[in-house]
Amino acid sequence: MKIGILTSGGDCPGLNAVIRGAVLYGDAVHEDEFVGFRDGWRGVIEADIMPLPRRRVRGIGRIGGTILGTSRANPYQDGRDGASLVARVLEQHGIDAILAIGGDGTLFTANRLAEAGLPVVGVPKTVDNDLGATDYTFGFDTAVEIATSSLDRLRVTGDSHHRCMIGEVMGRSVGWIALQAGMASGAHVIGIPEFPLGIDEICEEVASARDRRRAPLVVLAEGFVPRDAPAGFMDYELDEFGRPRFGGIAEALAPVIEERVGIETRATVLGHIQRGGEPTAYDRVLATRFGIGAIGLLHRGAMGRMVAVRGTDIIDVPLAEAIGNTKGVPRERWDEVRVLFG
Ligand code: F6P
């Protein structure tokens, strides 16, 4: 089988490990041939294709980013007939199937193509860990690790200056990174979109930590907005898909805490640092197993499906069930962390 791989949407530590797992397994077990589409669907649209022999993927599993590049293009944009375009490219280049690695936007496109009869399977990725169809996505563990070590550093400088430090982490509309990194770093308050605290509650926890001679550490998910925020407190602009481009909550809250609690407060947005690291061992293993699982799907003819993890098992689910199925932090995880505040 000749398989074309693409990575699309925001990058994520572990993408290279998926590519490596797929190529090594497909080559060894099925004698598959591999090519890569450069920059996600753009490489399909423009037939920008590179060979992916076994030797090209040696040693890439431990490197962050993606050797194929990525973009947020998709074959249906600008009113194009995406399915015909992709079918033509596959035929012209003798490619039998596409392995699409990406987040919800990519999986949406992959599903649309599969529903039009094209041979496509998916591998989910996102640092946000917000896909309901899989217990975990690779990249999340790495992002949590980076966020935790960054928050530990904020605490050190905060301690020295007796300041309140706010760390804002990624997560789009969910609070998984904030919850895990906040718990791991022993934050005094964590703000997540699923269970928004009010400004008063945040200030109380900050004051309580300060009164016990602690430098308060506040962790906020980028999508968090305080329950009692006045109108216009956070106005997010929309991205090209009409979704809010989150960020800025730490900067907005810092002066409020400073004024109400009377403690010098600094805001740090960790931003893309969280996505640029080398994948942790957990993410390398999960990503490699996803790559192997996706080749299994293709050889079973299970088009229109994507790999996922349930417990420690690699399973597969229809792409149609995976898209738009967002998984937020559940109540029991919030209750668990909530008692640790202050
Ligand atoms: O979905 C992954 C993510 O990193 C979010 O956590 C964040 O809001 C967004 O992507 C940032 O996107 P971009 O890289 O386009 O700025």
Image (spheres, rainbow, N blue to C red):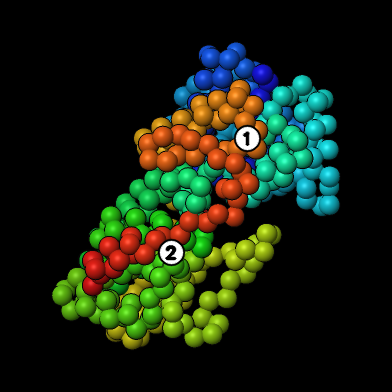
Q: Position of residue 303 (x, y in %)?
A: 65, 33
The residue positioned 83% from the left and 31% from the top of the image is: 88
Q: Identify whether 317 is placed above or below 56.
A: below
Pointer 2 local density, CA inside 10 Å: few below 14, some 14–19, many at least 20: many
- Left or right, residue 220 beside residue 106: left
Which of the 4 quarters of the picture holds residue 265? bottom left
Q: Nearer the viewer, residue 79 or 38?
A: 79
Q: Nearer the viewer, residue 205 or 76?
A: 76
The residue positioned 19% from the left and 70% from the top of the image is: 214
User: Which label number is shown at residue 306?
Assistant: none
Label 1 lies in ligand 1 vicinity (Cβ under 8 Å): no
Q: Is residue 139 visible?
A: no
Residue type, label 2 = Ala
Q: Identify whether 233 is placed above or below 144.
A: below
Residue type, label 1 = Val
Q: Position of residue 69 (x, y in %)?
A: 62, 38
Q: Circle 2 sits on which residue?
A: 221
